[in-house]
Image (spheres, helix red, strand yellow):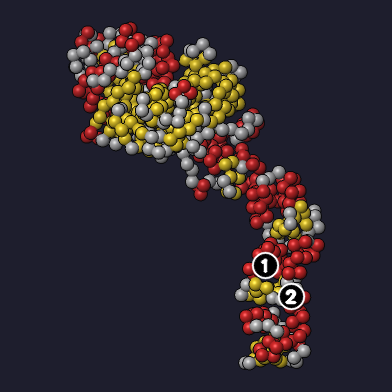
Amino acid sequence: MKYVTLATAGHVDHGKTSLIKALTNIDTDRLPQEKERGMSIDIGFAFIDYPQINTRVEIIDIPGHERFLKNAIAGLSSAQGVLLVIDTNEGIMPQTIQHVNLMKSFGIYHCLVVLTKIDRSDPMLVQIVKEYVEEFLSKEGVMCFGFFPVSSTEGTGLEELREGIGSYVRDLKEPDWDAFFRMNIDSAFHVKGYGTVVRGSCISGRLKEGDTLIAEPIGIEGKVRRIQNHGKFVKEGKAGERLALNIPEMDTKLIERGFWLVKKGELMKTKFLLISTKDIKPGKEYVFFFGMRGVSGIAKHIQDDIYAIKLSQFVICAREDKGPILDTSGRYVGSYTLVHPHPKKFSKNFIKRHITLLKEDLVNYQIIEGGLKGVNLKEISASLGKAINPQHLHGVRIGMFIYSAHIIGELRNKLVQLLGMHKGMMRLAEAKSKLRVSDEVLSYLLKETRGYTVIEGYIINEKKADIEALESFKKLIQAMKDGIKEERELIAFKDILSLAVRKGYVHSLGEFLYISDTLFNEFVNKLRQLGETFNIQQAKEKLGLTRKYLIPLLEYMDRKGLTVREEQVRRFLR
């Protein structure tokens, strides 16, 4: 089933809650104060099912009074669309305008307009208000998917509105189920026999029973025991749904509205951001909303519409997240779009040099920004809010890090220069220190630089190095003094063995057999004592070797051009 969340918007007393009750038979005013005052104070929840299009429309009713602006933000933060409710007797009012600004700040540039209380209005007035609203939305850049005059008390126009909502949500982009799981927490409470229940709206991803979630930014975790959607137990939840999760390990006293539930190892919290906005001034303090939660921060202007923000508290966010900005007195200022949630460099010069890349391609910006340290794949995915395929990245992957190909090329050149300044050997630690790289990067560079190997903490030039001074070489030669050795017997000398073979101190006979150069020459000289030619039996008796070792030795001599096989004998060529 498809799930889409719509929020109501509109001035106080324009009939939002009555409309939802008439549509769904659910009273979203659940607090005693709301009943007493006849006015919504907090967000409320309802739903409408559309079996014919396999869709459930989740509805969040937001308060219309200016004193409850943050609650309105909380409701709009989880929505994919809006029902803009306007009383035909009053038309557009201050909170109508403010709610339109808020919905735009969350990236919602479309709505359905519901003209309420038509039973108390003249039909001509309804038409006038419609035209006025149409003009207002056009100036605001908001697309209207239809105007629906209704009377919640008499039921007039409700059926047409239901059909209109169905058409509206069919055209809306589906929430991203493949992104990392994020649930916007609006409440947490204790249920006897179950423990803690955390409630909220899932804005991306999916989860199932048994998943371990973390409440951020405080970092407490727990396992999901049971999942509910509007009072019904379900096995999984996904983007667009209103969910209640039974997580006994989480203490309700620690959970606050505006916290996020995320999966471990996916999204990362941050205090430093790069955003795009035209609505703030540098050096001033503002309150930036991340979902339902407002956090104060100081703005530093970089260039054009890009600002660096230092927040007072950690938040969870991802590239392209949007939200409203308030001043410190609580007045709406404007909106922002998140450009970079985890910047490593705040140098104005660096950001300015790469500002186009920052705006258009965050991943490649992060790779350049990572410099010598690279950027972790998990950090790239966390910044985007979804897993990224490393094969699609334009960089060099070393372990779990991605590096700029340019940086790796420069490091390789610098390494070659360093090694050229040393006479065949250089300490590994010295190279690492001078290049300022990790063990993994240095290892990668050496693999990409032919003619070098690492032995006993030294980088060895295979052509120039005097390996006879190495302890491992001395032990290898000592171990090979008494005969031909199998490879399994020389495992402890794996690194020096291949180098010793390349430099001619050891011979590889094939068949995973090795012989020292000294012993090889000794065997050849003994065979020469047999004359210009010899057969296998004579060689066996002379050297005291079994056929397992003798045949590979004689074939190796043939390959080296020392001997040639002529039927049953071998003849020395030189």
User: The C terminus lies in which quarter of the figure?
Assistant: bottom right
Front residue of 383/279: it is 383
Q: Secondary structure at mark 1?
A: helix
Q: Relative to 548, does residue 279 appear above or below in the rendering?
A: above
Q: Earlier in the sequence, mark 1 or mark 2?
A: 2
Q: What label does residue 75 carry, if any?
A: none
Instruction: Indicate the amino acid at tag 2.
Output: Asp
Residue 144: image location, x then y, percent: 32, 23
Locate residue 565: give its quadrant. bottom right
Q: Specify few, some or many for label 1: CA neighbours under 10 Å numbering under 14, 14-19, or 20 or more.
A: some
Residue 47 lies, in percent from the top left, at 28, 25
Is residue 297 placed above or below 236 in the rendered structure?
Answer: above
Residue 238 shows up from this direction: no
- The quadrant in which the N terminus is found is top left
Question: Disc 1 to disc 2, how far (Cα)?
Answer: 13 Å
Residue 287 makes an appearance in the image? yes
In this image, 161 relative to 479: left or right? left
Which residue corresponds to the image point at 23% horizontal and 25% vertical from the top-left?
Answer: 162
Q: Secondary structure at mark 2?
A: loop
Residue at 54 percent of width and 19 percent of height: 296
Q: Give the number of the disc on residue 482.
A: 2
- Disc 1 target residue: 490
Residue found 62% across the figure and 92% down from its top: 567
